[in-house]
Amino acid sequence: MSTVFLALQTNEETRPIIEAILQDNPGAVVDEQPAMVKINAERELIVRRETIEEITGNDYDLQSMQVNMITMSGNLDQTDDEIRLFWKA
């Protein structure tokens, strides 16, 4: 299987995003660095707007996550409700 990943800056804005990603992707593995968090998953990783909103208690636009995104790996499928990184089987 191929691993997909998402790397985000480590800051106050990304903490609830990272928490939401880990909640929605129980098999994901976190690699914490001093200024970045890389989240790895086998074949698929999903970021859900709804989960981020539940954690923060505020509306969230997934497009705003790109400001804190360092890099990613995988095919990208994005809607207003979720970002999905995946490798086709």
Image (cartoon, grey):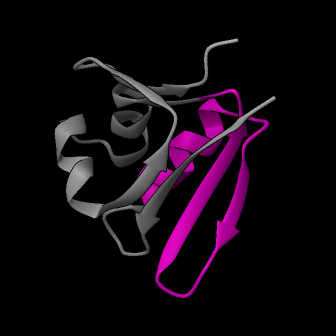
Picture residue at 69% right of the left edge, 59% below the top: 30
Is 65 on the left or on the right of 35, as rendered? left
Q: What residue is shown at x 69% (from left), y 27% (from top)?
A: 43
Counting from the top left corner in percent of width and height, residue 55 is at 43, 43
Find the residue positioned furthest to the bottom.
34
Residue 1, by quadrant, is: top right
Left-right relation of 1 to 53: right
Report the number of numbered marks: 0
Residue at 44% x, 31% y is 51
Q: Is residue 80 visible?
A: yes
Q: Quadrant of the C terminus?
A: top right
Residue 28 lies in what quarter of the image?
top right
Q: Position of residue 75 (x, y in %)?
A: 46, 27
Question: Magenta span has 33?
Answer: yes
Q: Is residue 19 above or below residue 21?
A: below
Q: Is residue 60 visible?
A: no
Boundaries of the magenta span = 15-44
Above or below, comparing residue 87 to residue 53 in the picture: above
Left or right of 43 in this view: 60: left
Tell whether position 60 is magenta. Answer: no
Residue nearest the viewer, comparing 42 with 20: 42
x and y percentages locating residue 83 in the rendered image? 38, 27
Residue depicted at x 58% and y 61%: 38
Image check: 32 left or right of 42?
A: left
Residue 45 is drawn in which quadrant?
A: top right
